[in-house]
């Protein structure tokens, strides 16, 4: 069963409401030692819970029972974003919770099952995790060992950084290009006139017919250029007339030759 640091006492703790929680103590008993033997190097928001382990030892001859209390201070995260579970070999161990601002005290309802003697230690384990929305900061731990009467025997301290969830990266807003206005026929004509008047060479943008050779239209077919039909007919008529005259002349020469007889060959007639 998990216990959040900012919650009120659990049902198990309510059953032991008469239990006096140990308060802050400035003095410790000689002959006792408390050490943190397992401290996570870092905690991550939304990550799996990690274990904090504390061990108490003594050089006293007399054995005694121990009640554990853990003081937790959080920076960057709220107490209700931290989940603490006191565990033993047989499962969760009941605790009571006191909180004040960013500090919480988590104390065992019952004494530890083990017995603290010379050469024999008592161990406390805590499973600690942070919610997904926990912020970046750090968490400080101060485990304390009390005897059954509530006397502080010894304490230790340690801290670990907390890495919060990074905010999702937001891409820069994409600028929407404004459409280029299409010039009207009047503006195009005016700009062409200004280019000619200024003496510059106007560069014409090829139209669909000019950019596509398969669709080009000949200038003579458009009616804009001079027609070659008239001069062609005249030249053709002159050539026909000259041809007919030449044929008549050759024919007349042929008739004249047949009328005067055969032309001399230059050889004498046979004897």
Image (tube, rainbow, N blue to C red):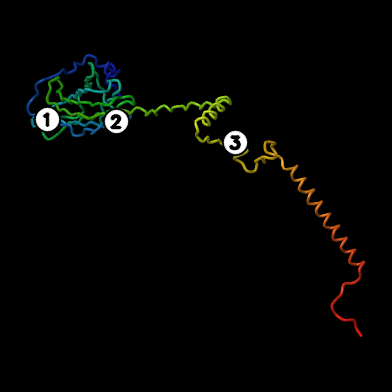
Q: Is mark 3 on a helix, strand or loop?
A: loop
**Counting residues from the N terminus, which is met first, the one under dot 1 or under dot 3?**
1
Marks 1 and 3, Cα distance to the nearest angstrom? Answer: 95 Å
Which numbered disc flags the more N-terminal residue, 1 or 2? 1
> In the visual, does 53 lie left or right of 243?
left
Q: Is mark 1 on a helix, strand or loop?
A: strand
Local SS, label 2: strand
Among the two numbered marks 3 and 2 on one chain, the one whose residue lies closer to the N terminus: 2
- Mark 1 burial class by Cα count in 10 Å: few <14, some 14-19, many 20+: some
Foreground of the two, 119 or 257: 257
Query: Which residue shows up at 89% across the image and 64% down it?
Result: 256
- Residue 83 percent location from the top left of the image: 29, 25
Do callouts 3 and 2 mark residues in contact (Cβ within 8 Å)?
Answer: no
C-alpha distance separating marks 1 and 2: 30 Å
Q: Image check: 48 left or right of 30?
A: right
Q: Nearer the viewer, mark 1 or mark 2?
A: 2
Residue 185 location, quadrant: top right
- Label 2: few (<14), some or many (≥20) within 10 Å? many
Q: Where is residue 50 in the image (x, y as percent from the top left)?
A: 27, 32
Q: How far apart are marks 3 and 2 (CA)?
A: 66 Å
Q: Quadrant of residue 93?
A: top left
Specify the label residue 44 is tagged with: 2
Which quadrant is home to the C terminus? bottom right
Dividing the picture into quadrants, the one containing residue 120 is top left
Label 3: how many Cα within 10 Å (few below 14, some 14–19, many 20+): few
- Please give the residue where the numbered disc 1 appears in the rendered image: 33
User: 243 above or below 122?
Assistant: below
The one nearer the camera, 41 or 201, is: 201
């Amino acid at each position: 069963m998990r216990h959040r640091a900012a919650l009120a006492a659990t049902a198990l703790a309510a059953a032991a409401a008469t239990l006096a929680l140990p308060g802050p103590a400035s003095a410790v008993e000689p002959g006792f030692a408390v050490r943190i033997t397992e401290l996570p190097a870092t905690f991550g928001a939304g990550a799996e819970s990690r274990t904090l382990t504390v061990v108490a030892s003594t050089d006293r001859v007399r054995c005694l029972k121990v009640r554990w209390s853990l003081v937790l201070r959080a920076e960057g995260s709220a107490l209700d974003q931290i989940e603490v579970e006191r565990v033993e070999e047989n499962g969760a161990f009941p605790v009571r919770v006191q909180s004040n601002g960013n500090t919480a005290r988590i104390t065992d309802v019952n004494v530890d099952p083990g017995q603290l003697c010379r050469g024999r230690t008592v161990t406390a384990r805590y499973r600690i995790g942070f919610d997904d929305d926990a912020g970046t900061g750090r968490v400080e731990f101060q485990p304390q060992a009390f005897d059954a009467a509530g006397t502080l025997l010894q304490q230790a301290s340690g801290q670990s950084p907390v890495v919060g969830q990074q905010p999702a990266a937001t891409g820069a807003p994409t600028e929407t290009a404004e459409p280029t206005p299409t010039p009207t026929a009047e503006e195009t004509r005016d700009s062409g006139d200004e280019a000619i008047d200024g003496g510059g060479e106007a560069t014409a943008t090829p139209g669909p017919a000019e950019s596509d050779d398969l669709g080009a239209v000949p200038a003579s077919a458009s009616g804009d250029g001079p027609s070659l039909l008239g001069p062609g007919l005249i030249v053709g008529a002159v050539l026909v007339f000259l041809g007919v005259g030449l044929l008549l002349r050759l024919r007349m020469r042929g008739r004249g030759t047949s009328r005067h007889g055969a032309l001399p060959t230059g050889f004498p007639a046979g004897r």
